[in-house]
Amino acid sequence: MNDDRSTPEPMAAPPPPTDAPQEAVYPPQGAIGGLPQGPALDPPPPETQRNLGMFAHLIPIIVAVLTSGALSFVAALVVYLVYKDRGDFERITATNALNIQLTLLVAIVISLPLMLVLVGFLTAFLAVIAAITLHIIGAVRASKGELWTPPLTYPFVK
């Protein structure tokens, strides 16, 4: 009788254990997840830098309108984290936008207990109007390529 079934090959025995300590293998310096890093990003052209700076101020306003103000801080934070390493202009404008949002957050938190005596509604409204105004001014200045430090804001992020 002819048997066409192949027989599996026996598995190789594992290497014998050694008493010598094994040296750990680490990825090369500057590698992420064991993969070598690519070259650093070149800064974008000036027109793109101005547009990114303008969007750093406009995105928190748009998100504030869409989410009733709840996620405008998160939008500014995401813009900052994405563009902080692209170039100086983008980093500075994204930092300014984030500082405006952080100052607004502090003003709203201070306004909450003041709402018990009705003054907080006025302070919260004024803080929102001031933040929107600062973002619009920042977007206009960034679209012109001008660096600008917004007034009335504390530099939480530098």
Image (spheres, helix red, strand yellow):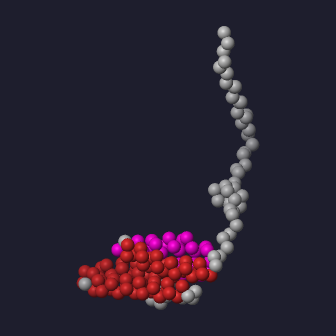
Main SS type for the magenta part? helix
Q: What residue is rendered at 37% in x and 76% in y?
A: 65
Judge from the rendering whether residue 62 lies leftward or rightward of residue 33; answer left or right.
left
Answer above or below: position of 64 versus 36: below
Q: Count how many numbered circles sit on residues in the image.
A: 0
Q: Any magenta on residue 149?
A: no
Residue 102 visible in the current orientation? no
Q: What residue is rendered at 42% in x and 76% in y?
A: 62
Answer above or below: position of 137 versus 28: below
- Which stretch is magenta? 68-94
Question: Which image quadrant: the N terminus?
Answer: top right
Depth check: give the residue in front, 32 or 155.
Answer: 32
Q: Position of residue 31 (x, y in %)?
A: 68, 60
Question: Which image quadrant: the C terminus?
Answer: bottom right
Q: What residue is rendered at 50% in x and 78% in y?
A: 55
Residue 5 placement: quadrant: top right
- Which residue is outermost to the left? 117
Residue 50 placement: quadrant: bottom right
Answer above or below: position of 21 versus 64: above
Q: Position of residue 157 (x, y in %)?
A: 52, 79
Q: Any magenta on residue 74?
A: yes
Q: Position of residue 81 (x, y in %)?
A: 54, 71
Depth check: give the residue in front, 21 or 16.
Answer: 16
Depth check: give the residue in front, 2 or 122.
Answer: 2
Residue 9 visible in the current orientation? yes
Q: What residue is rendered at 72% in x and 45% in y?
A: 21
- Which residue is outermost to the bottom? 151
Judge from the rendering whether residue 35 lies leftward or rightward of residue 80; answer left or right.
right
